[in-house]
Image: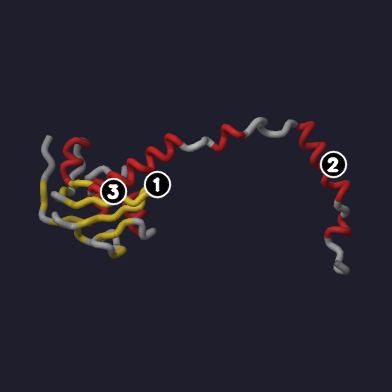
Amino acid sequence: MELKIVESCRIDKFLWAARFYKTRGLAAEEIGKGRIKLGGQAVKASRDVKAGDTLEMLRDGLLTVVKVLAVSEQRGPASLAQALYEETAQSIAARQKAQDMRRFTHEPAASIEQGRPTKRDRRTLEQARSSSAQWNDRWSAEL
């Protein structure tokens, strides 16, 4: 299968065809939230993108910068979709650094020694809370 290359197309169609987003609707939603920039400026979903443009995408809290090599309105296999763009060296380095940070940092959930409180623990907590603060003490206008 070969993708039909065109001169320009809508940015939401390009993001869908290049497999950055699963649907055009998701791509348009991200564009609407201002997470996609074309040449450093926020754009609307109807804006045309052409070969040579630079796209900045904020995905998963990480800025991804790609240069558009070719434009297609047709979605195809991932191997062909990757030929439509090229990620910049700085973007690749930033993504790799973030990956390493996730790999080598401490997992916050590992420090939890106990899980949720049991029913008995919850009742004890509620009893302790209710005995220490009475209704009138809590909402007194004299304080």
Q: Quadrant of the C terminus?
A: bottom right
> Mark 1 against mark 3, which lies toward the viewer?
3
Between 122 and 14, the one lying in front of the other is 122
* Label 2 neighbour load within 10 Å: few <14, some 14-19, many 20+: few
Instruction: Where is residue 95? Give x, y as percent.
Output: 33, 44
Q: Residue furthest bottom?
A: 142
In the picture of the structure, the residue carrying the numbered disc 3 is 91
Residue at position x 14%, y 54% in the image: 51
In the picture of the structure, the residue carrying the numbered disc 2 is 127
| Location of residue 21 (image quadrant) | top left
In the picture of the structure, the residue carrying the numbered disc 1 is 60
**Image position of 48 (left or right of 132):** left
Mark 2 vs mark 3: which is more N-terminal? 3
Instruction: Where is residue 33? Give x, y as percent.
Output: 39, 58
As measured in the structure, the alpha-carbon distance from the residue carrying label 2 to the one carrying label 3 is 54 Å
**Image position of 118 (left or right of 109):** right
Residue at position x 84%, y 58% in the image: 138
- Circle 1: residue type: Asp
* Label 3 neighbour load within 10 Å: few <14, some 14-19, many 20+: some
Instruction: Where is residue 37? Give x, y as percent.
Output: 29, 59
Tell me the SS state at disc 1: loop
As measured in the structure, the alpha-carbon distance from the residue carrying label 1 to the one carrying label 3 is 13 Å
Residue at position x 83%, y 62% in the image: 139
